[in-house]
Image (tube, grey):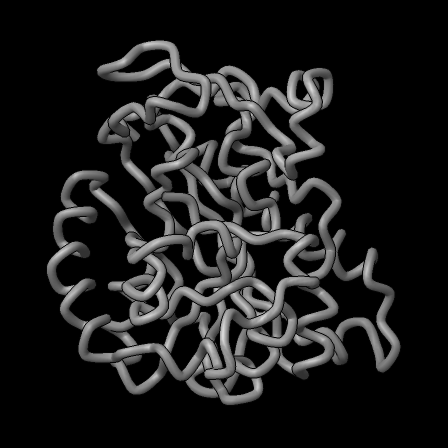
Amino acid sequence: MTFSSGESSISVTMSDERAETAKWDPGFTRQVTGWVGPLIRRYFRAEVRGLASMPESGGALLVSNHSGGMLTPDVLIFAPEFYKRFGFDRPLYTLAHYGVFIGPLGDLLRRAGVIEASRENAGKALRDGAVVLVFPGGDYDSYRPTMTANKVDFAGRTGYVRTAIDAGVPIVPMVSIGGQETQMFLTRGDSIARRIGLTKARMEILPVSVGFPFGLSVIFPPNCPLPSKIVTQVLEPIDITATFGEDPDIDEVDHHVRSVMQTALDDLSRKRRFPVIG
């Protein structure tokens, strides 16, 4: 299941009167990360580097590229390492599109710290001193073609910058490599989606991929991810006011964040010897 959020998330409201952040259950999260974390880490030979760059306390907006299509492992790789370092007294919330909360799975996701993507939800969590993880590129990013796997592309979405500014917290960039090698992503299919009118139903992409065991897949059925080695790198925090002044230009901040991320991703790419193997 892909955890994603984008510019459209700004208009999403909380699903009920109880704050999304209040539904986080540290005990349940400990159980999930304790059970799933080691399996995911071994399967993808996953590494999370640079956690020492994270602010030791206070709110922070963690901004990352998104990989792996529907079955992205990004959060399941990062969250256990985050809690191992900072403990379960410091919640990590992940912004996700409201569609993933449909059905009984929604309650489990909320208990694990996944919250509906909106500025209201993100702002409350950040002002309460939590770390919020956002993937601005959303599904558009997680289904990028494997041939352009190492390109940071948020599809022009900059809402995350305003969220950080309004909450008065730093942006902490993060990049990962290897997720687009878990299967062969051929195309996002955004032009196909427009041509056949899927955009009217808020479907901006119609991704096509090839993998195991189903071969060719047009969204469904989702293939099993190959055990590609995934490396995640946390980068130095960006103090927006200190770097860009009291009245920062949103596009300038966004460009800087993506440039820092692209440089780090290029460095990881140069050090990667072979696809999947790492």
Image coordinates for residue 151, horizontal then vertical, percent: 59, 34
**47 left or right, relative to 128:** left
**21 left or right, relative to 202:** left
Q: Residue at x 50, y 40 (%)?
A: 267
Q: Is residue 144 above or below residue 159?
A: above
Q: Is residue 71 above or below residue 86?
A: above
**148 left or right, relative to 8:** left
In the depicted view, which residue is nearer to us: 117 or 86? 117
Q: Quarter of the image holding residue 30?
A: bottom left
Tell me the quarter of the image containing the N terminus.
top left
Q: How many marks?
A: 0
In the depicted view, which residue is nearer to us: 155 or 107? 107
Q: Residue at x 29, y 53 (%)?
A: 77
Image coordinates for residue 250, horizontal then vertical, percent: 82, 62
Q: Is residue 58 above or below residue 113?
A: below
Q: Quarter of the image holding residue 127?
A: bottom right
Tell me the quarter of the image containing the C terminus.
top left
Q: Residue at x 85, y 71 (%)?
A: 248
Image coordinates for residue 158, horizontal then vertical, percent: 73, 56
Q: Quarter of the image holding residue 212?
A: top left
Q: Residue at x 56, y 62 (%)?
A: 117
Residue lying farthest to the top in this orientation: 215
Image coordinates for residue 145, horizontal then vertical, percent: 53, 22
In the depicted view, which residue is nearer to us: 38 or 241? 38
